[in-house]
Image (cartoon, rainbow, N blue to C red):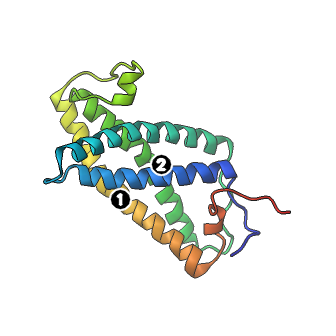
Amino acid sequence: MDHTAPHYTTFARLLHWIMAVLVLAMIAAGFLMVQDGLGRSLQNALFIFHKNVGVLVLLLMVLRIAYRLIQPPPPLPADLPSWQARAAGASHLALYILLVVMPVAGYVRVKSGGFPIEALDALGVPSLVPRSEGLADLAKAVHHCGAFVIAGIVLVHVSAAFYHGMLRRDGVFSRMWPPVIRSAK
């Protein structure tokens, strides 16, 4: 493992791994909660989890985008093939876009459909969208299609991380792992 390669800050790493856990949990809960045959209480719990963690993911994405604007990522290794650098850039951009679009579409679907988002409701946050079946249906379609796209991009992202960390061992994976940078003694 190349420990001399430029790496992300501890804050960026922690934010990445917190979001990774949340997004993987959201994907699993999202696909599971719409399955027939679940007990009503499990299905309700998954919907509540999905809606409320979706709000958290959106807030963390706003923080992540702001942090990235003030703290750009470290450069990729110079020997990385240009097609891989372009693919990494495109997949990261797609993930950033989807990690904003998906929570927004979920929010619009839920609120325009007249459903609660318990954490926001408890805080007294008013709905930002009107109640509208048409709007709810459109947002549901965007969220549904986006779920498959984000799951696919996450799979590619994880596969690329595995390739760089376990097979190529070129320092790309070690830029983000471990989540906390320990100071040298």
Is residue 93 in view from this perspective? no
Which residue is the extreme one toward the left? 37
The quarter of the picture where residue 122 lies is top left
Name the residue rendered at 68%, 60% in the picture: 75
- Residue depth check, mark 1 versus mark 2: number of the one nearer the observer: 1
Residue 171 image offset from top left, x and y in percent: 66, 71
- The label on residue 11 is none
Earlier residue among tags 1 and 2: 2
Q: Amino acid at mark 2?
A: Tyr
Residue 16 image offset from top left, x and y in percent: 56, 52
Left/right of residue 179 with respect to residue 140 in the rendered view: right
Residue 81 image offset from top left, x and y in percent: 59, 74
Mark 1 surroundings: few (<14), some (14-19) or many (≥20) residues within 10 A: some
Query: Helix or strand or loop: what does disc 2 sit on?
Result: helix
Residue 101 image offset from top left, x and y in percent: 38, 42
Q: Nearer the viewer, residue 3 or 32?
A: 32
Q: Nearer the viewer, residue 11 or 109?
A: 11
Determine which residue is flagged by label 1.
151
Left/right of residue 114 with respect to residue 122 in the rendered view: left
Determine which residue is flagged by label 2.
96
Q: Quadrant of the C terminus?
A: bottom right
Left/right of residue 48 with respect to residue 15 in the rendered view: left
Q: CA distance from mark 1 to mark 2?
A: 13 Å
**Relative height, residue 111 to residue 49 (above, below):** above
